[in-house]
Amino acid sequence: MTDLPLSPAAAPKRRLAMGILHFPMTRLIIGIVAFVIASIAASFVARTIDPSHAGVPRVAAATVTAVIFIAIYLAFTTFVERRGNVEFALRGAVSELAAGLAIGAILFSIVVALIWALGGYQVLSTRGAEVLVPGVALSIVSGVTEEILLRGLFFRLIEEWLGSWAALLLSAALFGALHLGNPNASLLAGFAIALEAGIMLAAIYMVTRRLWAAIGVHAAWNFTQGGIYGIAISGNDTPGLLVPRITGSELLTGGAFGAEASLPAMLVATAFGIGVVAYAARRGQIIAPSWVRHRHLAAAHS
């Protein structure tokens, strides 16, 4: 009979299986496999919706991709981790997303203002609003998918195992390393991405413990960079409303990779990220490594 209690002989095996599944690295591997499948599905759907990669269908395809990734993430937290929806909780979603969008746009505008003040950026002409479409599509996809994978999955599970500081370091390093395969990338560009965006976006997640604000910052940073100021996004040329002339050293402008690899971006975004990390620390949101938490829990029960 299938409804009989589990026999004593089988119980240790079940406990062992559940213990293995509970281990953060096991869940991380399962999550990576799930999102490889999600990427394949999203790519197929996107090609079906937008075979020409242009116009409004491109934004629709990007939106569907984002929805697929969110659905897979919610399925992962529900059926694998067996917990409720935290990272995409609807309460406060609108305000956090709006705040993130504003922060991302303002921060990158400050970066461009610094480059302009130092003679590295000049507006030559403007384009029509139709050029915003590719920037919107790219920002939706990068903001949602990369934040789910890097902060919602990698940072969160590494933090659960090794603690906040190790997760911050490792997720930032991974984020920078993943950009080394982009066009016009360099070691400086990878380091800049790790330093500025890796720290800042993880810090925002640490404070909110949801993904809305981090998605907003990431998406708005990319859209403002390419869609408004016409600067390459992580090495990918994206036409924007403004047609610029960018001159000067790569340290000032970021060169062909884009302003993300510039000294102004590193200073502005890293300073903001460190400030958010300090705020998280003051609020007691730094998580200790798992063995430290277990030792404290054991001491409390002794």
Image: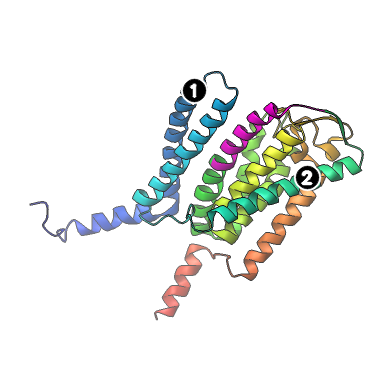
Task: Examine the rendering and report whether any part of residue 291 can be seen.
Answer: yes
Q: Is residue 195 shown in magenta? A: no
Question: Who is closer to the viewer here, 89 or 60?
Answer: 60
Task: Examine the rendering and report whether any part of residue 187 can be seen.
Answer: no
Residue identifier under label 1: 47
- Number of marks in the image? 2
Question: Who is closer to the viewer here, 123 or 26?
Answer: 123
Q: Which amino acid lies under the numbered mark 1 shown in the image of this protein? A: Arg
Q: Position of 89 compared to 208: left or right?
A: left
Q: Residue 139, how many percent across, how many down? A: 62, 37
Q: Classify mark 1: residues with Cα within 10 Å, few (<14), some (14-19) or many (20+).
A: some
126 w.r.t. 210: above or below: above
Q: Position of 134 compared to 81: left or right?
A: right
Q: Which residues are magenta?
A: 126-144
124 w.r.t. 72: above or below: above
**How far apart are the alpha carbons under marks 1 and 2?**
33 Å
Asked which secondary structure carries label 2, the reply is helix
130 w.r.t. 270: above or below: above
Q: Which residue, as the protein is rendered here, is positioned at the far bottom?
A: 302
Residue identifier under label 2: 109
Report the magenta stretch's main SS.
Answer: helix
Residue at 43 percent of width and 54 percent of height: 85
Question: Who is closer to the viewer here, 226 or 132?
Answer: 132
Marked residue nearer the N-terminal end (1 or 2)? 1
Asked which secondary structure carries label 1, the reply is helix
Residue at 88 percent of width and 40 percent of height: 116
Q: Residue 236, how many percent across, how many down? A: 69, 29
- Tell me where residue 165 sits by quadrant: bottom right
